[in-house]
Image (spheres, rainbow, N blue to C red):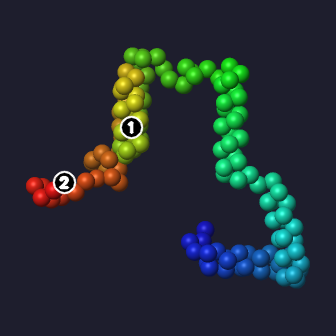
Amino acid sequence: MSRSPLFGNLARAMRIALYCEKNNISTSQGMEQLAALEARVTRWRVKRREFLALTAVSAFGAVAAGQIDRTYAAPKTGSNVKVGIVGAGLAGLACGYELKKKGISATLYDANDRVGGRCFSLSGYFPGQI
């Protein structure tokens, strides 16, 4: 995967050249085939916002039709379910907090010896100065 537009264009040109050489066709024929392929793909490609809108509409329709019951995802409060959360960053801590509010105990696992993930304050580094 390219990290800059210039390198991305160079890599694309190399792929086109290799395709043309492999199939023993001229570069102009390869470019015509590529243009036809891109036209077909672009016609069926769904943009991110369109996908999110369609997903939201279909989910709302399913809920409105009564096909989805909202209680199936969470176990009953106080149940003996064991939950393990991998990662004690902000998302893991928030997940554990929400589960604790519902009465479900969870165990946090992290590779680091402290919680918070990539978020930390400078108060531990300069005690008394901040």
Outermost residue on the left side: it is 128
- From the top left corner, tell me how far across and down residue 124 is, in percent: 18, 54
- From the top left corner, tell me how far across and down residue 16 is, in percent: 77, 76
Residue placed at 81% from the left, 53% from the top?
A: 44
Mark 1, Cα crowd under 10 Å, few <14 / some 14-19 / many 20+, is: few
Mark 2, Cα crowd under 10 Å, few <14 / some 14-19 / many 20+, is: few
Between marks 1 and 2, how big is the CA–CA gap?
22 Å
Element under disc 2: loop
Residue 96 as seen in the image, left or right of residue 49: left
Q: Examine the image and state in which quarter residue 17 appears.
A: bottom right
Residue indicated by mark 2: 123
Residue placed at 89% from the left, 78% from the top?
A: 29
Question: In front here: 10 or 111?
Answer: 10
Residue 33 as seen in the image, left or right of residue 111: right
Residue 40 as seen in the image, left or right of residue 63: right
Question: In front here: 11 or 94?
Answer: 94
Residue placed at 27% from the left, 48% from the top?
A: 113
Question: How many numbered marks, from 0 up?
Answer: 2
Residue type marked 2: Ser
Tell me the quarter of the image containing the N terminus: bottom right
- From the top left corner, tell me how far across and down residue 72 is, in percent: 57, 21
Residue indicated by mark 1: 94
Element under disc 1: helix
Residue type marked 1: Ala
Question: In front here: 129 or 40?
Answer: 129
